[in-house]
Image (cartoon, coloured by chain):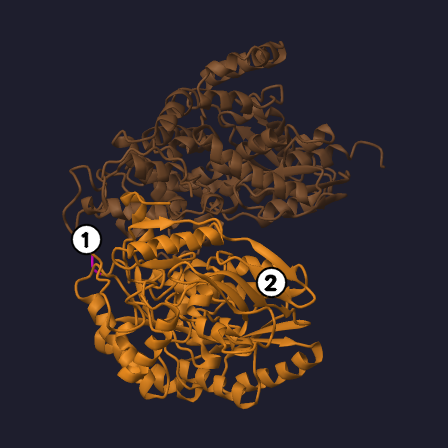
């Protein structure tokens, strides 16, 4: 009969302490400021409960406090002045993965992602966030992600750490035990870097001749911009290169605009709207400066989490007189790479990839962007590839951005369920469309049996690229 | 166990409009813990309410003042599926759709399919005798529960019914199903499973107005056809549904009918021609047939998300669950629009037309002063009218807190006293869900009301 682990930091010792109508608990009750969950959004929830079965934390812990409906009820209680923003209530809000599975199934159309982001902004403004989230925010979300040079340096050090055998020594020496839990978990989760780094612009990768017609027909070439982002080019450089090759192969000049930065999604999820807005404005400047005037110009990303955020720049900057309109324009031009590829007459890949794979729906693709068919369409276009559906493929893997650092235990439990569903398919490889999911599932598969490929999670474009490259090989 | 006041804030509601804060919530892992919790509460004189997923629409899962809840979310194992005898034995916290999905792997199904089936639990289904669109052909929960082990108010365990189809002695199983948690708490349940039909065909009949859709219902049933499901969705509900999902309902329709046929291929083929001609003859502007699973799922998705979708029109709804003879549908629906005008409340209609189970839904924003009272008054008038037309108060959602004041419309004092005698046989101390179903007993007026705040008029509508 255990409750989820929430420290008993009570501010209200007895039911009688809850105040009746119109008498706020204390002066801190209620949300305040500009970035607040709107009343209209909060009251859209009719507490029907249809979200429950889609929520990874509820289905794992089975308590209403860790459900979307419960979290909204707590927001409403705060909004109504029935409860303050206590440590305990914040701990329930921070247990949320922000996977938005509830939003996709909500019959009332409650914009859950948005109200949770504003709620987190409130907890930040009141300095009520949990210690783990604060730490991750300070050192990682603010300290590293928005600073390309710092990030790069960090990853260079990581490369040395992994290459020189220093990692083996550190791990054997039990030095790690001296680290706090969060850092220890982060060390364990450090991915094997897929080198070399992808070097973003300033350059344009030219479109290749189309195979079907033998040459690049002038009318079919267009220019698109690719988000390079923060950690993806450093961690998954090969996927970035695959994305470029797949796009150029499909008649696109691929521009990787200089001056672009991290999209700010994780800052937004942590409630740091200020940093998220700053990054959004820089990206809007960088991307709209280049080819925005051209017909067919699209801003493409291979990261579901970034795409979801970029498509919502309009909401993020709605009160910014200078950027509100460009933000909406930017959002309209943004497309996930699988969404974009499926919208084209895709160059049919001639090479075979004889492999049985299963596809993990990234939350921010399936739930936030409602894109589930397109990645599968792309995969099905690959000769020889067998796509086996896993049970609950759109249930979060527990990665959820920084979640695995802030809530390592629950994240691991959710991952265990996911790994069971993956194994049940008998697939040789897992394919997904988001860097965070790739890292999280890869960490889970690290100890599994089978060939190295079984432990490596690919992006949809990695597989498509593999099929294109296999064309050159002799048949068979 | 959950007892921190801030955590209890999320256990004060279910899917209905009422609220009541429990003193504590117990999450047992097995039958023994249920029994011990009940025994302890009994000794201490604390009332107990069972809670499944909290999706009920009549306040059945809400704790009595000073009472506790037993939440069954962690007792959710499917214990056994007997494919030869077509039964399944489960714990009460199993989700309706999870059971159905599980047994479909063996070519079977669990027939009752409430709209909330992907969230609601079988224990709750038993308490409320839950229905669903397919109950037209297959009956409600009571027709599918074979036996139960039940914990009584003092924690004693008894068996009601058995796995067998026929049972000697009194049919206590039948009395128990639908007793709204006042007789005891089911801790282990054996249900009947049905084989999957050979073929399924779903029709969408599009009508210019409610009246013609109603006559289509009569025409279909008049042909002697018993569809597996026959649902009506009115213009307002179509709009609400299409706001949140594209179910493929034409937005300019006055009403649509969703009709499902299933059975042997030849039989369905023959009946479907009759259904189609009945729809055209009664003035359908379009008839669509879904034969693919994906098309059918899309049509049903709209129906099943309708109640939640009302949230796009107004933040609160009060559902009237009246049942009337099918032949009175047109009359009653006219009355619904009269009531809507008289009280100035928007009313949406999405309901089981085949068995005359209406679900007029009063949509309002309770922060608007006086509106809740107007909605309730309108609902009362509708319920009275349903009873007058030879119908009943509730088809499938239970009486609970929400409709208890309307019971005298249907029953005399003596009728209700007789029901209480049956309850006293199971729960003489009346510790389980006290104050529900009957208009007397304690009041649940919540101590904590929502603080009304100012909203711009017309914000939601």
Badge 2: how crowded within 10 Å, few (<14), some, or many (20+)?
many
List x then y, in percent, for residue B45: 28, 57
From the image, state the color of chain B.
orange
Instruction: Tell me the CA gap for discs 2 and 1.
Output: 46 Å
- Residue A203 within the segment the image draws in magenta: no
Q: Give the range drawn in magenta.
A: B452-457
Task: Give me the residue at 44% from left, 19% from top.
Answer: A180
Badge 1: how crowded within 10 Å, few (<14), some, or many (20+)?
some
- Residue B453 within the segment the image draws in magenta: yes
**Is residue B327 rendered to the left or right of residue A212?**
left
Residue hosting label 1 = B451
List x then y, in percent, for residue A90: 32, 37
**Is residue A129 rendered to the left or right of residue A253?**
left
Q: Nearer the viewer, residue B434 or A236?
A: B434
Q: Nearer the viewer, mark 2 or mark 1?
A: 2
Task: Give me the residue at 49% from left, 85% from top.
Answer: B216
Kind of element beneath mark 1: loop
Residue hosting label 2 = B88
List x then y, in percent, for residue A453: 71, 31
């Amino acid at each position: 009969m255990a409750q989820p682990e929430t420290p008993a930091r009570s501010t209200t010792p007895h039911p009688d302490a809850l105040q009746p109508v119109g008498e706020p608990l204390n002066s801190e009750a209620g949300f305040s400021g500009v970035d607040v969950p709107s009343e209209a959004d909060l009251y859209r929830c009719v507490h029907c409960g249809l979200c429950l079965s889609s929520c990874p934390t509820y289905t794992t812990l089975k308590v209403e406090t860790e459900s979307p409906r419960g979290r909204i009820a707590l927001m409403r209680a705060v909004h109504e002045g029935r409860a303050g923003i206590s440590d305990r209530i914040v701990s329930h809000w921070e247990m949320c993965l922000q996977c938005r599975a509830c939003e996709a199934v909500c019959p009332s159309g409650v914009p859950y992602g948005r109200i949770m982001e504003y709620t987190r902004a409130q907890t930040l403004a009141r300095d009520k966030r949990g210690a783990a989230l604060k730490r991750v925010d300070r050192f990682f979300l603010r300290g590293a992600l928005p600073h390309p040079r710092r990030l790069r340096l960090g990853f260079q050090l990581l490369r040395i750490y992994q290459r020189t055998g220093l990692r083996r020594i550190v791990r054997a020496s039990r030095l790690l035990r001296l680290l706090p839990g969060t850092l220890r978990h982060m060390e364990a989760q450090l991915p094997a870097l897929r080198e070399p780094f992808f070097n973003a612009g300033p350059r344009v990768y030219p479109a290749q001749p189309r195979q079907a017609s033998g040459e690049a027909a002038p009318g079919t070439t267009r220019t698109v911009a690719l988000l390079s982002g923060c950690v993806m080019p450093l961690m998954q450089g090969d996927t970035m290169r695959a994305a470029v090759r797949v796009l150029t192969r499909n008649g696109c000049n691929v521009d990787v605009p200089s001056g672009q930065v991290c999209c700010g999604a994780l800052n937004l999820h942590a409630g740091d709207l200020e940093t998220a807005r700053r990054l959004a404005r820089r990206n809007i400047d960088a991307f709209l400066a280049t080819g925005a005037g051209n017909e067919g110009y699209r801003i493409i990303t291979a990261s579901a989490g970034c795409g979801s955020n970029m498509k919502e720049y309009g909401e993020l900057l709605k009160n910014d007189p200078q950027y509100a309109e460009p933000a909406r324009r930017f959002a309209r031009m943004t497309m996930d790479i699988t969404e974009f590829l499926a919208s084209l007459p895709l160059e049919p890949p001639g090479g075979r990839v004889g492999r049985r794979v299963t596809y993990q729906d990234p939350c921010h693709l399936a739930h936030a962007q409602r894109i589930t068919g397109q990645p599968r369409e792309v995969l099905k276009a690959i000769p020889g590839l067998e796509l086996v559906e896993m049970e609950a493929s759109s249930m979060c893997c527990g990665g959820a951005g920084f979640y695995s650092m802030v809530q390592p235990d629950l994240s691991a439990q959710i991952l265990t369920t996911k790994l069971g569903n993956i194994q049940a398919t008998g697939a040789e490889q897992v394919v997904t469309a988001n860097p965070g999911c790739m890292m999280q599932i890869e960490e889970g598969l690290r100890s599994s049996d089978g060939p190295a490929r079984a432990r490596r999670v690919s992006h949809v474009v990695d597989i498509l690229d593999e099929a294109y490259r296999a064309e050159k090989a002799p048949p068979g | 166990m959950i007892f921190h006041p801030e955590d209890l804030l999320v256990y004060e509601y279910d899917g209905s409009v009422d609220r009541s804060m429990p003193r504590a919530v117990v999450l047992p892992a097995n039958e023994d813990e249920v029994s011990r919790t009940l025994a302890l509460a009994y000794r201490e004189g604390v009332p107990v309410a069972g809670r499944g997923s909290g999706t009920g629409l009549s306040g059945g899962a809400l704790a009595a003042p000073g009472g506790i809840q037993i939440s069954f979310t962690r007792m959710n194992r499917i214990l056994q599926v007997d494919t030869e005898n077509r039964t399944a034995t489960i714990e009460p916290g199993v989700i309706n759709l999870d059971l159905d999905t599980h047994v479909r792997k063996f070519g079977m199904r669990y027939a009752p399919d409430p709209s909330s089936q992907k969230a609601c639990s079988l224990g709750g289904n038993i308490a409320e005798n839950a229905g669903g669109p397919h109950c037209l052909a297959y009956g409600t929960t009571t027709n599918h529960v074979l036996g139960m082990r039940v914990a009584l108010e003092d924690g004693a365990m008894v068996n009601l019914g058995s796995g067998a189809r026929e049972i000697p002695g009194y049919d206590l199983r039948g009395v128990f199903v639908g007793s709204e948690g006042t007789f005891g708490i089911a801790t282990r349940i054996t249900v009947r499973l049905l084989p999957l039909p050979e073929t399924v065909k779903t029709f969408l009949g599009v009508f210019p107005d409610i009246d013609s859709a109603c006559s289509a219902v009569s025409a279909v049933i008049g042909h002697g056809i018993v569809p597996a499901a026959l649902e009506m969705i009115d213009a307002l509900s179509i709009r609400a549904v299409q706001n949140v999902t594209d179910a493929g309902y034409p937005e300019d329709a006055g009403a649509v009918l969703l009709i499902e046929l299933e059975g042997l291929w030849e039989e369905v083929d023959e009946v479907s021609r009759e259904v189609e001609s009945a729809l055209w003859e009664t003035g359908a502007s379009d008839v669509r047939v879904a034969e693919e699973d994906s098309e059918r799922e899309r049509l049903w998705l709209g129906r099943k998300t309708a109640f939640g979708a009302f949230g796009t029109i107004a933040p609160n709804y009060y559902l009237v669950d009246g049942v009337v003879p099918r032949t009175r549908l047109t009359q009653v629906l006219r009355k619904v629009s009269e009531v809507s005008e008289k009280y100035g409340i928007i009313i949406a209609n999405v309901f089981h037309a085949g068995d005359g189970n209406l679900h007029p839904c009063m949509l309002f924003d309770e922060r608007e002063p006086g509106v809740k009272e107007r909605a309730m008054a309108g609902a009362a008038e509708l319920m009275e009218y349903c009873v007058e037309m030879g119908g009943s108060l509730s088809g499938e959602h239970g009486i609970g807190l929400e409709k208890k004041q309307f019971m005298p419309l249907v029953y005399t004092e003596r009728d209700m006293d007789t029901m209480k005698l049956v309850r006293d046989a199971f729960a003489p101390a009346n510790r389980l869900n006290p104050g529900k179903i009957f208009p007397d007993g304690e009041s649940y007026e919540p101590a904590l009301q929502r603080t009304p705040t100012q909203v711009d008029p017309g914000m939601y509508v």
